[in-house]
Image: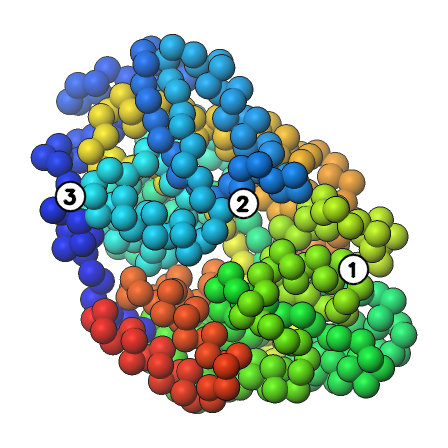
Amino acid sequence: MKKRMKKVATLCLAGVTAMSTVGVTGSAVFAKGDTNYDVDNMDFENVELRVAFRFNNGSDTDGQAKWYYKALEEFNKENEGKIHVTDESISTESDYEEKLTTDFASGNVPNAFLQYGGSRTREYVDAGYILDLTPYFEQYPEWKEGVQDFAWETTQFDGIEGTYGIPWSAYQLCLYYNKDYLDQVGVDVPESWDDLVDACAKLKDAGIQPFNYSDKDNYHFEHLMSALALKAYGTSIADDLASDKEAYNGEKMVAIYQKMKDMIDAGYWGDGILSTDFNTERNMFEAGKAAFTVDGTWNCGNFQNDSDTTLFDAQKIGVTRIPYIDEANKTVEMGGGSDTYYITTLNKSDEEIAATVKFIKYLTSVDSINEMCKSSPTTYAEKVTIDTGNYLLDDVNAIMAENTESKLEIPTYDSNTAAMDTIRNSLQALATGASAQEVGDDIVDKMSAYE
């Protein structure tokens, strides 16, 4: 739904200090007109940085987080007396989004943050608060060349020249299944949505719970909605919704919500959907309490690193595409570049910006991502050059190699900055008895408040 964006200025100028971001580049000599972007060879002295990502500090099972905090410690040690980075990560998405909103409103933003592109980031790019990394990629072409071509969408914004950020992860939404349970009821791996519904019916009749679906994290419904819309209508649906050619309460999208509601009403998604988070859903699947689970390709590493790896070790977990609704869209997927680092210029000195570029470059080199992949085998934006030894990841890579088209989450393309949160919140009503049409109408009504 194409709406006028609430400009950052109207949200936060009261908290912004007088420093202008115009001309702030992070160049080597901190003076106007300098064109040296060689941050690796700059001299820094006692530069303090704050970064806000979504890594789970202290997690025993999150391989990415364990690698990141080790890398952070090593960077600070290598740059002692020159650059020091303080981490302010929050792992819960809703709390993290609230932090970013508050920080930008006060003008006290972190030097770098993590986001997924789209409308959530565009308002900051429009306001001039995000660094264009183009000159740094020209300085270090191997840095940019280390990222796969399909992953850059999160850094590009229509009508604005430049590359605003660098992605480090990539993903695709997938359906994971328990091979033994499908064999037990005599069904093949589902290819179409009708195949999946039929499989769920046979599993339930046999006393096997098809899913323990979760949306306490408030993203899981929306991820599947985006994937199913692409599987039904192709990638054009994202642009059609963004341009108002289609509506979130129109016939096409209501049909998608209805498919989700039918799964809930049939009991195929289990109980306690809104009180269950995805870690619990995944752990229940690993414990044999469900035949299916839906989530991103990052679970290849989670299945290998979680406390219960019985199914993974026995290679009893399978992975396949999200089932299609229209066979013409069988290989159209929801995915692409995901976690992306953005560097802020709002109230930041050139020295801070340059030091932040150096830190982000350190985190996103191919060598660094190879090390992260050892801790958490999954799909990355960078060109991983090691053998991961993870059979699920091998299967995922084979699937992704045959994709014909992909799009990020559909709300990402909407210029209404409230689209993502509004859609995610409204979709939860499917689990509390709302009709598909009521959910669509609620999305449209609430988004209209942000015109």
Return the residue at label 1.
287
In the rendered image, residue 201, in percent from the top left (x then y), is placed at: 76, 85
Q: Is residue 140 above or below residue 102?
A: above
Q: Amino acid at mark 3?
A: Gly
The residue at the point 89 percent across, 72 percent down is 183
Q: Amino acid at mark 1?
A: Ala
**Alpha-carbon distance for marks 2 and 3?**
32 Å
The residue at the point 43 percent across, 69 percent down is 424
Q: Which mark is residue 15?
A: 3
Q: Is residue 238 above or below residue 299?
A: below
Mark 1: few/some/many CA within 10 Å (<14, 14-19, 20+): few
Return the residue at label 2.
169
The quarter in which the C terminus is drawn is: bottom left
Q: Is residue 354 left or right of residue 209?
A: left
Q: Nearer the viewer, residue 292 or 57?
A: 57
Q: Is residue 270 above or below residue 159?
A: below
Q: Nearer the viewer, residue 248 or 14?
A: 14
In the rendered image, residue 99, in percent from the top left (x then y), is placed at: 34, 47
In the rendered image, residue 222, in percent from the top left (x then y), is placed at: 49, 69
Question: Of callouts 1 and 3, which one flags the residue occurring earlier in the amino acid sequence?
Answer: 3
For numbered disc 1, what is the local secondary structure?
loop
Q: Amino acid at mark 2?
A: Ser
